[in-house]
Image (cartoon, rainbow, N blue to C red):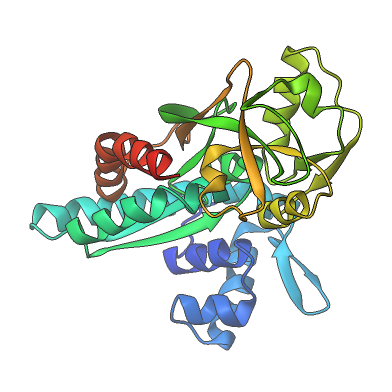
Amino acid sequence: MQKLEPPIRTLRLLQVIAEGHGLVQAAEKIGMSQSAASHAIAALERSFGVQLFARNSGQLRLSRIGEQILPYVRQILGSLDAIAEEVVSESGLQTGTLRIAVVPSIGGSIIPALLREFAKLYPGIDVSLLEGTDHEVAEWVRQKMSHCGFAALPVAMVNTEPIGKDEWMAIVPANRFEVPNQLKLERLARHRFLLSGGGCEDHIYRLFEEACVPLSNHLLVRQMDTLQAMVAEGLGVSLVPSLTLIRKPRNIRAIRLVPRQYRTIGVLLATDAVPSPALSRWLDLVRSKAPIVLRETLTRN
């Protein structure tokens, strides 16, 4: 078998297309013309001897073998970026790229303050965010689409590091639900239950299973804003992490559970991740500042 030494720029093109960009947008992103990008893809496929992309109505998506080699492509490009960052760092400059995956409850609460501090310390590091469910965040970290992630623990097949906890809170219509200041899951389950479909569902199912409380009368609602609006209109009750209640509607009441239940929040890293200088600096900041930011955020809530 001939030795494969594909052009790095073409591998970057493959990665950008795999992230959901069309050929034109991907080419622009890495500074190529559309014609040059098309020729680069064709040349890469010829050198590999396989079809890396499936073409459907002019749209490009990775073929089966393209999906299989994508993690290795990401690993190659990540290593090259880390080498560049190390070399630049040696000269005293602080540059690099950092892709962070987050679930909405964390991305909309503690992450902005951390990013603001990080930008002050390292203005030369380019940071981008991917927002998704717990499952999506974990998969992006495993596939190295992101350098690290933030989600509720536990998460399988990645390395995790807890950074703090928030509390599971029952939310009910403020004026249509007579309850004390604490509430058992049994009573919550008697009403129409609105189940968050943004990634919290597995954790909520587990809470009810551990309490031996069946959860039969429930409706899956993906968007947290929609779920809270439905509760405010008296269309059901729900159970949400307290970080999601920072901007809750006025006509929602949040009530603690009996016994109290907590969600552990953590950082996710690929099992074979070798932190680049940019990622190492970010993790240092998260370890020192995230618990403080989390505590202050929950205190204000």
Dividing the picture into quadrants, the one containing residue 294 is top left
Vertical relation: 16 (above or below) 67: below
Q: How many marks are shown on the rendered structure? A: 0
Vertical relation: 276 (above or below) 85: above
Residue at 75% in and 49% down: 231
Return the residue nearer the eye: 25 or 210. Answer: 210
Quadrant of the frame with the C terminus: top left
Residue at 48% in and 64% down: 12
Residue at 67% in and 28% down: 203
Return the residue nearer the eye: 33 or 271. Answer: 271
Residue 95: x percent and y percent? Answer: 23, 61
Q: 219 left or right of 276?
A: right
Residue 278: x percent and y percent? Answer: 28, 50
Residue at 57% in and 44% down: 137
> Does the rendering let one see residue 1?
no
Vertical relation: 6 (above or below) 141: below
Vertical relation: 172 (above or below) 158: below
Dividing the picture into quadrants, the one containing residue 181 is top right
Residue 191: x percent and y percent? Answer: 86, 34
